[in-house]
Amino acid sequence: MFFVPVLCFGQVNENFTDGDFTNNPIWTGTTSNFVVNAAYELQSQAKTTSTSFLFTPSVAFEDASWECTVKITYNPSAYNYAMFYLASDKNDVTAGCKGYYVQVGGSNDEVSLYVQEGTKKTRIIDGKDKRTNSNPVNLRIKVTRDSNGNFMLYDKLPSESDYVLEGSAQNKAVMGSSFVGLLFANTTLTGNDYYFDDIVVTGEKVVDKDPPLWTSFQLEQPSSLILGFSEPMDFARAAFSVDQGMGSPASQEISKDNSSITLSYDSGFERGKIYTLQTTGLTDLAGNPLSNPTRMTGITESIEPNDLVINEVMFNNPDSSEEYLEFYNRSDKLLDVSGLIFTTRKTDGTLNTGNSLPPQTTMLPGSYLAVTSDAERVRKYHACPDGSNILTTGWSTLNNESATVVLTNSGKDTVYDELTYNVKWHHSLVKDPKGVALERINPDLPTQHQESWHSAASEVNYGTPGYKNSQYRELDTNVKMDKFVWIEPESFSPDNDGVNDVCFIRYKTDANGYVANVIILNAIGIKIVQLASNILLSTEGFLTWDGHTDAGKNANVGIYVLYFEMFNPNTGSRKQLKLPIVVSSR
């Protein structure tokens, strides 16, 4: 019965009265630099300048409490301090870890709480300066954490009867623990001056309910796939299958930390094919299944002109989100876009420094990629669906009125696409362009045509980063050859809600060389907008009307008339047609 709480809640109660730190519980680390002294305290015994540590298993994290007595028999400095690791995912923090620790001493002689993510250390509770400005330092430390991630940091001097609150903070950057630990950093003269005692840890283990995430998915030629995940995985019941005749892997190799696996196949992957990997039975150690069991990959191919286009731009961000650029892969190839530069042009035409896409960034055929300074903030603000592809990258602020954005290779000697946007391109209903993106109506439309762009719909919070645009329209259509002009849709509602906001006036010609005049008339025959004046037509194409009049106003709800006239100066052929257009409201 005595051991039941320990097993259920991961408690630690260590006072070193058994004269040993290698058993009951077992502490591991730089054991040669620690000893249990005659007073049954854990004492440092480092002979040279070093950083030494010991860790023991502890999963306590929810509604948890950590206590430890720390004594330093001199006044610590920036190079001499002690750490009490409340939580860590590793028992060797030499190369970093995920966890929380209390630092005693340092340059400001304080007791503070830090969160550590890899090698990045961030102070989340800044204790009172000069709290450890004494010789010796002798403190009882206590930290509590509730189930909502609220930390409270206390300490107490031998002369104090009650704990003193150093501060509080909420932090959820790390959501679990495997170990609790002790660490000291010393110079040659202070190797024996650190003491730790009476370590008490209570709390419950975090119940992992979050699905594991993909962190990498790499095809290694000729015949291997490397799968990486955000946490250790249970591969015991997992099965993997690749289409295109590849089937199941011939062999598998799991990494030591169980967070990645290499799948090897008997036959090699072929250039020009896109492969789909299907996983079944793959979970994390807590049994949570992978949220997206299917991934696609292939052998990357070189980027050619017109493969990549700028597809959306948020150049005046809302207060609760960030600016972004979106790119679209128009090709049928898997493209490695790692290292590509997105930047802007200076007034003299040269390119600014810009920012690069991160390593191992690929784009499948027909896929979208949005880049921004804070992907999660953008994703949350626009309520992006699962699968929206948004990356956090470096960023340079875009001009709110007009600028030229450029997508180029790393050497900046090949431009893949270039757009000079203007705030005046927004729909007239957009009175305040702040927080409204410009979307390309179709990736096959010319980049530098105002008619190719439209304000994003209100229904998507005025932006669709990383997925299909709200204003996307198909260009291909099947019509009878006896029609030379038709309207899609015949009734449209230019209210910028993302549904039939634009009227497409499509045409087909029976010969080259036709010139057209296109106007919109109101119900009593008065011209309200000239859409085209003596423009040279293609053999097949379209014009658009978004409800604007030549007076810069929005057309009222009602029935209008399209007058389409085209003539061929070479043959003398002339065609005219009047069609009704309905401007409606939803």
Image: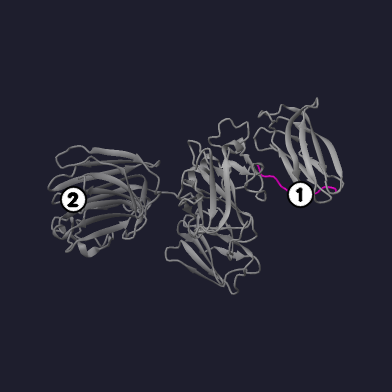
- The part of the image, by quadrant, that contains residue 280 is bottom right
Residue 477 lies within the magenta run: yes
- Which corner quadrant holds the C terminus? top right
Distance Cα–Cα, label 1 vs label 2? 77 Å
Badge 1 amino acid: Ser
What range of the chain is rendered magenta?
Answer: 471-480
Residue 358 in percent (x, y) is at 48, 56
Residue 183 lies within the magenta run: no
The residue that label 2 is drawn on is 77
Residue 33 in percent (x, y) is at 20, 62
Q: Under tag 2, what secondary structure?
A: loop
User: In percent of the image, x 53 and y 35: which residue is there?
Assistant: 434
Q: Nearer the viewer, residue 247 or 65?
A: 247
According to the image, what is the colour scheme of the structure? one colour
Q: Is residue 459 left or right of residue 141?
A: right
User: In percent of the image, x 59 and y 41: which residue is there?
Assistant: 438
Badge 2 amino acid: Ser
Q: Does the image show residue 401?
A: yes
